[in-house]
């Protein structure tokens, strides 16, 4: 169903779509018409068990257009057949392979939505542990950062969130972790060492139960010395960016992403 919805989403004009593999992981390359030397590694959401290149193709393409970048979207392994850390392993290997194939880290932006935001953060933690260089920037859309489920917005936003409910999260978490520890920083990157992270942009809706996951991430990142920005979409829901081009708030959010990325490539940070 999610793939079918994604297939019906309106693609931005002029984006070429090409299937391939990177580090033996199936991927999709989305290339805008501009002469892009930047690359966005986008990690799709879906609660670690759903989603694909197809479900998030239009969103990833719009991030690429806004960022003036080619986008690579890995079809990472999904739970429950492939529980933690299988999907994370795939994404880390894709990032390492991009570097080994000649891309410089400063050409790469890592982005992710929802569970993909979790994977984006965990990928950087793994990359730092392996001594790999950090990308130019990170963009997170409604990231699920805390699988211990301790954020206060799980309660305070439950009545207004039209997309997610608290009782949905524990089954998703258990499906992904397969009995693993939800406090593991590679599963809950909120609790990891964020000090080496590059400039980071976080978008979250004021009406979503994962609001606290973003707010606490930004607080911890700022305390660790990270250049981090938070945009809270007023009266907006989980990954409202998916509703572009029909939703003006989604178009505005994508423009914010483009401006953030452009600033990081033009000011040398």
Image (cartoon, grey):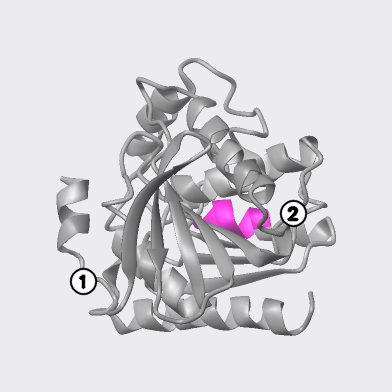
Q: Nearer the viewer, residue 107 or 242?
A: 107
Q: Which residue in the protein does label 2 denote?
A: 134
Callout 1 secondary element: loop
Which secondary structure type mostly characterizes the magenta part of the structure? Answer: helix
Q: Residue at x 61, y 43 (%)?
A: 97
Q: Earlier in the sequence, mark 1 or mark 2?
A: 1
Q: In the rendered image, is residue 103 in sight?
A: yes
Q: Number of callouts in the render? A: 2
Q: Residue at x 39, y 36 (%)?
A: 169
Residue 160 spot, x, y in % from top left: 32, 60
Name the residue at 47% across, 33% down. 24
**Image: 133 above or below 242:** above
Counting from the top left corner in percent of width and height, residue 142 is at 47, 58
Quadrant the N terminus occupies = top left
Find numbered disc 2 in the image and state the secondary structure of the residue it sits on: loop
Q: Does residue 14 belong to the magenta stretch?
A: no
> Where 87 falls versus 260 (above or below)?
above
- Quadrant of the image occupied by residue 106: bottom right
Q: Which residues are magenta?
A: 211-217
- The residue sitting at the front extreme is 101
Which residue does the numbered mark 1 point to in the structure image? 10
- The span from disc 1 to disc 2 (Cα, nearest Å) is 32 Å
């Amino acid at each position: 169903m999610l793939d079918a919805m994604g297939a019906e989403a309106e693609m931005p004009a002029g984006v070429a779509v090409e299937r391939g593999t990177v580090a033996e992981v199936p991927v999709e390359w989305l290339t805008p018409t501009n002469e892009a030397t930047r690359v966005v590694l986008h990690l799709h959401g879906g609660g670690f068990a759903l989603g694909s290149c197809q479900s998030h193709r239009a969103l990833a393409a719009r991030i690429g257009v806004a960022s003036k970048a080619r986008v690579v979207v890995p079809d990472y392994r999904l739970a429950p057949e492939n529980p933690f850390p299988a999907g994370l392993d795939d994404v880390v290997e894709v990032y390492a392979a991009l570097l080994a194939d000649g891309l410089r880290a400063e050409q790469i932006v890592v982005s992710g939505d929802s569970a993909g935001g979790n994977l984006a953060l965990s990928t950087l933690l793994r990359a730092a542990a392996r001594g790999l260089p950090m990308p130019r920037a990170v963009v997170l859309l409604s990231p699920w950062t805390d699988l211990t489920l301790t954020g206060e917005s799980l309660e305070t936003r439950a009545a207004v969130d039209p997309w997610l409910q608290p009782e949905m999260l524990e089954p998703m978490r258990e499906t992904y972790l397969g009995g693993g520890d939800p406090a593991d920083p590679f599963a809950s990157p909120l609790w990891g060492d964020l000090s080496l992270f590059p400039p980071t942009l976080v978008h979250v809706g004021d009406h979503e139960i994962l609001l606290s996951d973003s707010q606490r991430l930004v607080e911890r990142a700022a305390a660790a010395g990270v250049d981090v920005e938070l945009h809270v979409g007023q009266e907006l829901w989980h990954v409202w960016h998916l509703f572009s081009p029909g939703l003006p708030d989604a178009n505005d959010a994508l423009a914010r992403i483009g401006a953030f990325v452009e600033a990081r490539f033009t000011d040398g940070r």
